[in-house]
Image (cartoon, rainbow, N blue to C red):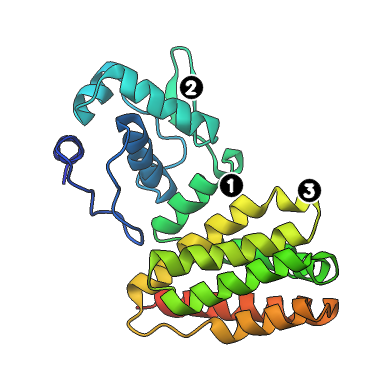
Amino acid sequence: MNDVDWMAGMKDGRQDQGGGIGTPIVMGRLHHVVAHRLATQIVSGTLPIGYVFPAEVDHAETLGVSRSVLREAFRILTAKGLVSSRPKAGTKVNERRQWSMLDPDVLAWQIQSEPSEQFLRDLFELRMMVEPHAAEMAATRRSEGQLIDMANALDAMERYTLATEKGRAADQRFHGLLMEAAQNELLFSLSSSIMSAIAWTTAAKQRVQDAPRDPMPEHRALYREIAAQNSRQAQRAMRTLIELALADMHVALRR
């Protein structure tokens, strides 16, 4: 599908089906759709580091959108560090070190675009550095209300399963509550990035595996340690959960 056909599909309500691991693009504001398209081409390497985009008028015509739509799309990508513009030099793709790697959208775009082994390693290393310590703190700082909410989230996760949006939302709710229960504002500021990583890797695993492993046992084990205020055991339980999640991701990507 070329860009003109793709944009026509967006205008008449169809969804984009291309692009490796990821869900189809849902119809939305056109500049967001264009930004998504360009971003996935960038993070996948289709548009390599240093690539200079065509002149605005030509690029907009190729995509079948107005110049104002293209400008808004580039504003989104500029804000996230993926591209930069200079007078007379045009707009080019930035080096990866300039990308806002912890931005939830940037994380999602990379996971959708058949992530490299190095990216997955980095992503799960981040989780391993953050979440076990959050679990350790949550075990001694959580409130009874948060504990009840965590239990309800796990019940919903088990009832709906991770094969459904409701089940995945419950999974994110559980992890979000745990980060909140750690009662550390700076740590909590990372929660949106952690939630995005969990959401997209979980969705990717569910799409490519016929019978994914049941993740409830390690989630229940983690909850029990937090409920019992066993901080060290909670840290270990979270480490086990993340290690198993990474193993599942490797299995999924080999299929």
Sooner in the amino-acid sequence: mark 1 or mark 2:
2
Q: Mark 2 or mark 3: which is in front?
A: 3
How many angstroms separate mark 1 from mark 2 (CA)?
19 Å
Q: Classify residue 176 as left or right of residue 250.
A: right
Rendered image: mark on residue 185: 3
Location of mark 1 (residue): 101
Location of mark 2 (residue): 85
Is residue 231 in view? yes
Residue 190 percent across, percent down from the top left? 68, 51
Task: Say which element carries label 1.
Answer: loop
Residue 175 percent across, percent down from the top left? 63, 65
Badge 1 amino acid: Met
Q: Quadrant of residue 237?
A: bottom right
Sooner in the amino-acid sequence: mark 2 or mark 3:
2
Of residues 108 and 125, which is closer to you in this image?
Answer: 108
Q: Residue at x 25, y 54 (%)?
A: 18
The reply to whether discs 2 and 3 touch (Cβ–Cβ < 8 Å) is: no
Q: Classify residue 19 as left or right of residue 184.
A: left
Q: Mark 1 or mark 2: which is in front?
A: 1
Residue 194 percent across, percent down from the top left? 61, 58
Q: Residue at x 47, y 12 (%)?
A: 87
The reply to whether discs 3 and 1 touch (Cβ–Cβ < 8 Å) is: no
Residue 61 percent across, percent down from the top left? 20, 23
Badge 3 amino acid: Glu
